[in-house]
Amino acid sequence: MADAVEVLSRVGIFSMLPRKELSRLAREAHERTFPAGTVLTDQEEYGTIFTVVVDGTATVSVDGTAIRTLGPADYFGEMALIDRDRRSATVTAGTDLQCLMLTQWVFRPFAMDHPEVVWALLEVMVARLREAERRAP
């Protein structure tokens, strides 16, 4: 698998962090590989993992409708970590998928110690909300 620090540096919400902080986060990440077709998150289940795609693609679907394709440096799982509620979407590996995974008990304190990460997440949330509003009937 690719160097975890390098992978994290390409993720938008982490891209502004110094290498030292990326290294700190990378040490806590778990590397996992999933075969194509694996359901990584299931809508309506509770989640405690933030996942970064290292290699491969995954499909995000809501109520059975595909809404987005994820690829390298994309991530998912942040919403369930923020509000500690159910997953808002199902994510399925479209190809063999390599990922870095961070648990809630690692991700939340790290984000709270790095307000620039929290602000970047807010920007992403606003963009997703606007997208969802455009799709609404």
Image (spheres, grey):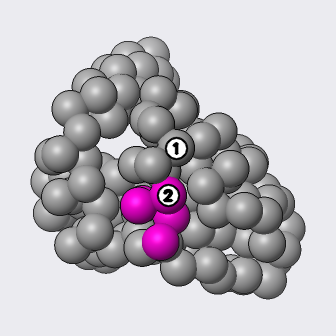
**Front one among 59 and 98:** 98
Where the C terminus falls, by quadrant? top left
Q: Quadrant of residue 102?
A: bottom left
Residue 73's spot in the image, x, y percent? 66, 45
Amino acid type, mark 1: Arg
Residue 124's spot in the image, x, y percent? 40, 28
Q: Is the stretch drawn in magenta largely helix, strand or loop?
A: helix
Amino acid type, mark 2: Ser
Q: Which residue is drawn at 47% across and 72% down?
A: 27
Q: In which quarter of the image is residue 42?
A: bottom left
Residue behind mark 2: 23
- Dots 1, 2 in contact, CB < 8 A: yes
Asked if residue 59 lies left or right of residue 116, the reply is: right
* Crowding at mark 2 (Cα within 10 Å: few <14, some 14-19, many 20+): some
Can residue 35 be seen from the camera position used here? yes
Asked if residue 128 lies left or right of residue 121, the reply is: right
The label on residue 48 is: none
| The magenta segment | 23-27
**Front one among 110 and 73:** 110
Whether residue 130 is situated above or below residue 113 in the rendered picture: above
Residue behind mark 1: 19
- Secondary structure type for disc 1: helix
Asked if residue 120 lies left or right of residue 6, the reply is: left
Structural distance between the alpha carbons of marks 1 and 2: 6 Å
